[in-house]
Image (cartoon, helix red, strand yellow):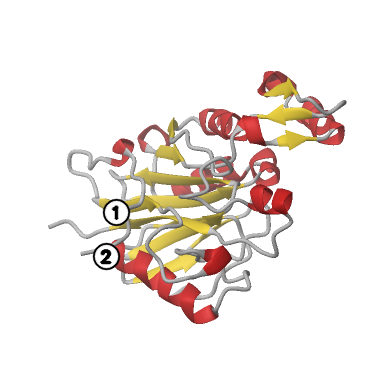
Amino acid sequence: MSRLSPLVAAAFETVDHGQPIAHGFFTRQGGVSQGLYQSLNVGQGSDDRPENVTENRALICAHLRAERLCTAYQIHSPRAVYMGANDTQAPEADALVTDQIGLALGVLSADCVPVLFADQTAGVIGAAHAGWRGAHDGVIENVVALMCTHGAHRENITAVVGPAISQAAYEVGPEFKSQFATTYPDDQDLFIASQKPDHAMFDLTGFVMRQVARARVSGSLLDICTYQNEADFFSYRRTTHRSEADYGRQMSAICLQSCR
């Protein structure tokens, strides 16, 4: 029995005649890493022991009953890539799509927004890492469009936005707000004044939810702050505020399973 206890979304209940899926928004609990990386750190770019990261990833793969687990080399981009049966290398991208049974797609985060997608009727899934830049530049639309290229239909796609930094913990500077004022003038209500002059608190998950709506797919939100919930989540910004040497990453992952 798995010792992992990821958050799951009711929105991914198996639909009639649909493809079953396994998924999870995994917390930092249940792994083998120690110290700053306690305990389910999956960040290959961290200074954690590589063998611990490998074992933690294997635990997630086993929990999902997947044959293998694919992640991207995340670059804060809007790029989405299809993963086929023979694709084994991690692409430079921030979203992955597949229709292959047994192939788990994972995205890493430590305050950025993980988003899992599924069209269970068509048997097509996706996973996106939506930092502010990727979300701003269109990663949500791109993963949905790529899913449709491989047989999904927008009206059947469900997207679940996972734990990420909350507005109360996400302070941004004037240049950030000015950029959004130019490209997303209708989203200025997602900024509220902070205590620091000329700065604001930004609702990143709220923006991602609007991007999901703009992609014309159904969306739901797991409204949990990674910054404030230290026991369960790694947080890049919390680490920065504490001047700690490094930080771990958690994973959100999804996998198509065979019909039984």
Q: Is residue 135 above or below residue 200?
A: below
> Are the two marked residues, 1 and 2, in contact with CB atoms closer than 8 angstroms?
yes
Q: Nearer the viewer, residue 135 or 31?
A: 31
Q: Is residue 117 above or below residue 45?
A: above
Residue at point 36% right, 46% down? 7
Real-space Cα separation, disc 1 to disc 2, in angstroms = 8 Å
Q: Which mark is residue 65?
A: 2
The answer to which image quadrant residue 73 occupies is: bottom right
The answer to which image quadrant residue 31 occupies is: bottom left
Please tell me whether mark 1 sits on a helix, a strand or a loop: strand
Residue at point 47% right, 50% down? 231
User: Could you tell me the amino acid type at mark 2?
Assistant: Arg
Please tell me whether mark 2 sits on a helix, a strand or a loop: loop
Sort mark 1 into few (<14), some (14-19) or many (20+) by Cα contacts within 10 Å.
Answer: some
Residue 46 x/y as whole percent: 62, 69
User: Could you tell me the amino acid type at mark 1?
Assistant: Ala
The residue at which mark 1 appears reads as 22
Tell whether 3 sits left or right of 223. Answer: left
Please give the count of numbered marks on the rendered protein: 2
Whichever of labels 1 and 2 marks the residue nearer the N terminus, that label is 1
Residue at point 64% right, 46% down? 131
Q: Is residue 5 visible?
A: yes
Sort mark 2 into few (<14), some (14-19) or many (20+) by Cα contacts within 10 Å.
Answer: some
Residue 223 x/y as whole percent: 47, 33
**Figure quadrant of the N terminus:** bottom left
Residue at point 52% right, 33% down? 212
Tell whether 207 sits left or right of 68. Answer: right
**Figure quadrant of the C terminus:** bottom left
Residue 50 x/y as whole percent: 54, 79
Residue 180 x/y as whole percent: 77, 30
Tell whether 114 sits left or right of 151. Answer: right
